[in-house]
Structure formats: C-alpha cells, structure tokens
Image (cartoon, helix red, strand yellow):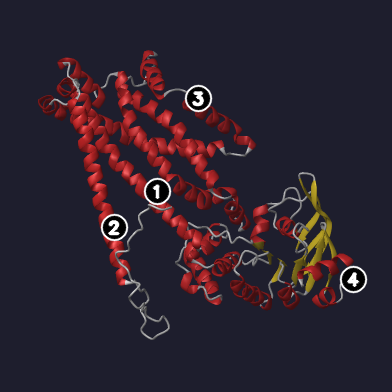
Amino acid sequence: MSGWPVPRRRTSRSNVTLVTPATTAPGAPEVYFDPVRQAYRRKRARRDALVGMASLLGFVLVVGFAISRTSGWPLVQETFFNGSEFIATFPGLLDAFLLNVRIFLIAEPLILIIGLLVALARDLRSPLLLPLRVVATLYVDIFRGVPTILVIFLLGFGVPALQLQGVPNNTVFWGTAALVLSYGAYVAEVFRAGIGSVHSSQRMAARSLGLTSLQTSRYVVLPQAVRNVIPPLLNDFISLQKDTALVSVLGPIELLRQAQIDASSTFNYTAYVGAALIFIALTIPMTRFADWVQARMRKRRSMAGTA
Amino acid sequence: MTNTLLDIAGVWKAFEGNSVLRGLDLSVARHEAVVLIGASGSGKSTLLRCINGLETVDAGRILLDGDLDVSAFKTDMDAVRRRIGIVFQSYNLFPHMTVIDNVTLSPRKVLKRSTADSKEQAMALLQRFGLAGKANDYPDRLSGGQAQRVAIVRALAMEPELMLFDEITSALDPLLVGEVLDTVRDLKAGGLTLIMATHEMGFAREVADQVCFLDAGVVLEKGTPEAVFGSPQEVKTQEFLARILK
C-alpha cells in the first residue's frame, strides 16, 4: 500500500482535551453538537455544493460547444430554434393549448370515477353480480390491449359515421371519450392494486367489529387504498396531459395540430419545439409534485415503521 | 337463562386437508375467564376465530348464550360479531384514523349510535385505561402497548358479551406486556366473560378460572389453574409446562 497519500487531518483534535457536557448534570443541553465537528460538516456541505455547480456548468459548456461546432448546427438552429418564427407562432400555440387543457380537465375526473367503479366491480364476489364483474373484466382487457390512438380513431371516425340519431359527431367529444375509456382501464388496475395493497388483517379486524363487507370497503379498505395509489395516479395524470395531443388525429385544432399547421405553412419546425416547451411547462410541475408526494409518503411510512 | 354463555361441541376445522381442530369441546360459563394454553399449531387461534365466525367450522356446533348458533348455515355473522369481540396479536388498528375514530367507527356504523354518544362512550373507555391523552393521535404515534390497549378499547366499545384475546401480548416488547395484561385483569374484575390464548403462564395462573391445555386440536386437559399447573395429569401437559416454565 506504499505510495498512497496519507490524508492529513485539517481539524486535528488530538492535542485538544475532549470536553463534552455531562448528560447527568443539571441544565445539560438536550442536544449537543461538537462545534468543531459542526464547522467541518458545514464546510463539507458548502464544498459539495460548489463542486456540483461547477461540474454541471462545465458539462453544459462542453456539450453546447460540441453541438454548436457540428457542421449541421446552423441549419438545425434555423429550422428548429428560429427566434422570429417562435415569436410569430407561440401565441397561437398557447391559444390552441387551451383545448388540451379543457380535454384534460374533463377527462381526468371521469377517468377517476370509471377507474374506481371498474376496480370495485372486478372484485365483486356476489354470484348475482357476476355479469357486472364479467363486463368490467372485459372492458379492462380490451381497452388496455388496444393502443390509445387506435381507440381514438375507432370512436372519432367510426361512431359519427354510423349517423345515429342524437349521438354527437363532435371530434373533441369522441376524442375525449376515447381517452377516458383507454385511461379508465389503466386507472382501474391501479386502484385494484391499491385495494390489494391493504393488508387482509385490516379487513379481518373491521369484520370482527361487526362492520359489513360494504362498510369495511367504504371506511377501512378504500381510504387506505386510495392513499397508497396517489403516486401512480399522478404518474398517469402526467401521461394523460401529453396524450391529449393524440386527439389531433381527428382534426380539432389543439396544440399539436396548430404546430403542424404552422410548420407546414413555413417549412420551419420551430413551432414543434414551442409545442414541446408548452407540454413540458405543464408536466414538470406535476412531476415535481408527484415526487414530493412520494417522498412525503415514504417519510410517513418509515415513521410508522419505528412506532 | 343458563349459566353457560358459550357451548362448543365436537368442532372440526381443517385447512387444506390439515386438521387443526378435531372434535373439540369447550364450555364457558358467564363471567368466567378461560385461558387456552398449548404449543403453536395446537389450534388456539383457529378456535378463537371459529367462535366469532372469522372461520366457518367443518363440523360441530358453537352456541352463544343458548340462542345464537354461530355454526349454523344461515347465521348472520355480523350479528355474531356484534356480540363477540376479538383482539389480535397484531393490533390491526386502522392507520388512517385517529384513536377516537378507530374506537367509534363500529358503534356509529353498526350500532347506529350518534357521533356524540359514541364519542362520549369512547372517551370514557379511553379514560378508564389511561389513554384519554391519545384520543386524537394516529396509531403510528402509539407504542405497541398503547396500540394494543386501544385495540382492546375498540372491541369493548361494541359492548360484547364475550371477549376473545388471541395472544395479544406476543408481539410486544417485554416491558410493555404488563400494561396490556393489567387491562385484561381489569376487565376480568369487571365481570366480562373472556377466552384468552396466551403464553404468559404466570398471568394465566393468576387470572384464569379455567385453564385448557390444547393439543392436536382437542382440549386434552382442563381444570383450575392450581390443578393444571400444580399437578397436570396428562404426560403431554407435563412436557409442555416443563418446556415453557423452564
């Protein structure tokens, strides 16, 4: 092992007499932190932060420099990151995005309701309600298996083509309905996993107190199940925010469609980048929120573990 | 009204071809404290779970107070469980509810009591067992002993005629066993009929009116604590006690 540098302790305390307060003495502090140790730890934290920032900055500079030096960069910049094109198209994109927001806001509550009802129906045990269980199972099997965009095509073009009396032939309506049906199947399975994650002893304890099966689900199992699946549900929300763009295949002018129109009229793709930025601006806060919720739940759970 | 509260005759119960109870008989008098002892797997837990209908029996009869046949095909098990309380080894408190909500849930939903009434009753019970200060805490803030006492209070709030305790101290830190046993002692003194499966032999000797030694799914030996602990007749009882009291 010769040749290895021996680390030099900068905060050598070997020549200092160690004095820590006696815990039994009256007026002894509840918490005592060796000031030298504390200062060392602070210094370490400061240094770590500085090194991290410098490293990140260096990385960005190197990558940026490398990209800007490639021969194709001027063309890419002109076609995808064109400032004047961006300014010209962005307000129109934001306007179109309102339709995505509307689709999302209408679809999400419906998805939650359908998901929960289907999850409950799939776990029914009463023989009389077997049809309900079969229908729910078929629904999940079908709509989880068919690609969302295909469901949108089938409903959006297929149903209006039937020209049924009293059935709307509005593309936004059918696009939203397709998203609801497709996501409802996924969310049903998320809820079912949540119900399964509640330990059977909870159900047993509730039944032993005389609660009926229905009361046990309502007051004991579901509240815990829903809490357990909030992180995966938020994940599905984020996914749905993006998938509202799929409705564009039916023709309504939402964000992606608007960007397409802009791009094809000028042969410049900056509008697509603008559209991407708008989607990101909405999903990033949601992602951070999901992270925060997950971290908080982990903390609560580990606290419960020590009790 | 006879003096017998619970009459168990010839009860069989098997799990996947494994017989756990094999024609077990047991009679429990009003205000009696019955302690079940025996090795793990001797059928103590299964018996308790059959008594309040968490498991259905394969054969035999369980009669509560001469009128309610727990083992009948068409018995409403919710009605059975309103009259028989059970406390488990793992406290099974509802983690998303405060202590007071845990205790008042079934009086409100099952007995249809008003929130105010059930709260008042719950507070009185919590007070009695030194838990009033914990009423608004969530279960994850309780020690094991406190959690188990809350579980007992939760079962008591239904005012059961019979209480079943299934190794309620087995999951506890040894330092916390005492406070839970004190609670049971208190209930016994109050005249509650109870059946308790336990490995706490000192406590069994002190509190039991009747000690039953279960072996291979039957009550092999029963009697007063003095008889069973003092001069056990069966070889298997002697062996069990010798091992556990060593």
For disc 1, the neighbor class at 10 Å (few under 14, some 14 to 19, many from 20) is some
State the CA–CA distance, disc 3 to disc 4. Answer: 67 Å
Which residue position is annotated with label 2? A45
Nearest the eye: B47 or A215: B47
Which residue position is annotated with label 1? A294
| Amino acid type indicated by mark 1 | Gln
Q: Are marks 3 and 4 in contact (CB under 8 Å)?
A: no
Image spot of residue A64 (x, y percent): 20, 33
Q: Is residue B236 left or right of residue A298?
A: right
State the CA–CA distance, disc 2 to disc 1. Answer: 25 Å
Label drawn at residue B233: 4
Which residue position is annotated with label 3? A142
Q: Is residue A259 left or right of residue A141?
A: left
State the CA–CA distance, disc 4 to disc 1. Answer: 60 Å
User: Who comes first in sequence, dot 2 or dot 1?
Assistant: 2
The answer to whether A182 is drawn above or below residue A75 in the figure is below
Q: Give the chain letter at badge 1.
A: A
User: Who comes first in sequence, dot 3 or dot 1?
Assistant: 3
Tell me the residue at 31%/19% (across/down).
A249
Tell me the residue at 51%/41% (across/down).
A193
| Amino acid type indicated by mark 4 | Gln
